[in-house]
Amino acid sequence: MFNNIKRIHTFITVVNSGSFTKAADQLFMSKAMVSVHIKSLEDSLNVPLLIRNSRGFIMTEAGELLYHDFQTIFSDIHSSLGNVVEKHHSLSGHLRVSSTVEFGEVFLIPLIGEFCHAHPELNISFHADSSLNKLVNDNIDLAVRLGTLEDSALKSRKLGRFSIRMVCSAKWLAQNPLSSLEDLKTAPWIANSNIKNAHHWTLRHSDGQTFQLKFSAKFSANSSIAIRSMVQADLGIAILPEWLIKEQLQSGECVELFPDWCLPKQDINVVFTGDHRVRRHCRALIDYLVEHTDF
């Protein structure tokens, strides 16, 4: 039976390629061996399958019947084998991913969506949070974190960097004009409680000068979106990601203070524990984020 299957495969290849020579090349065998396979198949069936002529060959009625029946069978076999390989190499399982609400909404979730379309067997849970503690306690596989990482026990890969701006509402500035950087120290500030040393920043001028900005916050929040809303409510000054305040700056609702003085750019890292939970689908998503995060 096995020998006949091999011979039938040779016969199908000869018909599909249109010549014994091309079939021999595709099957990595000699032209003489192809002829032996065809002759052995005809002998076992006791019926001619191919009639050679000056142009090559033509199929007999029996050859046409055999070809049409087994062409479909071999096509199904190839498809099934392909499905097995694809299934083995496709990503599946459950992946738990975390980031801040605002970064997740603007950047991360759209990328996860594209990744999931490419790997439909994969299930992903998104957790909006900015704490690294839950990376271990809640079995989070990957966490995208903004700013400086301080936990050396965690592994990470950098996705990029983004600019931050010192902003307030146009209405607030009209009511509280600022003439110098020193005025910032006594102004009402809105701080991000997730950031360590959120009350101390180094400003750098385009000519190389630096200014140490220290202030006491009158207001605080653990969400950049909430801080932006507090700025829009005319409560004071805040430092926010440029991508989060871009529309408000363009519309004139908010203004950047002392734009010649820059704040340090902030890192975007994908963080993971580095233990046995860094599975293949986890590494694949990390690579995808590294490749597609555009900053």
Image: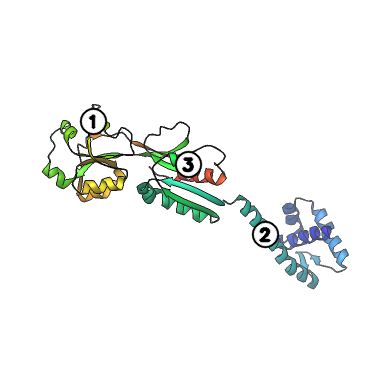
Q: Quadrant of the N terminus?
A: bottom right
The circle on residue 214 is 1
Q: What residue lies at 53% left-to-right and 43% top-to-bottom?
A: 283
Q: Give the number of the disc on residue 203.
A: none
For the point 19% across and 45% down, which residue is it?
A: 235
From the viewer's side, name the closer residue of 255 and 230. Answer: 230
Q: Amino acid at mark 2?
A: Ser
Secondary structure category for the residue under label 2: helix
Classify residue 94 as left or right of residue 107. right
Relative to 141, is 85 above or below? below
C-alpha separation, residue under disc 1 versus residue under disc 2:
67 Å
Label 3 amino acid? Asn
Mark closer to the chain start, 1 or 2: 2
Question: Of helix, strand and loop, which one carries label 1?
Answer: strand
- Is label 3 in a helix, a strand or a loop? helix
Q: Residue at x 84, y 62 (%)?
A: 41
Point out residue 137 in the picture as x, y percentages from the top left corner. Answer: 48, 41
Q: Is residue 76 left or right of residue 158?
A: right
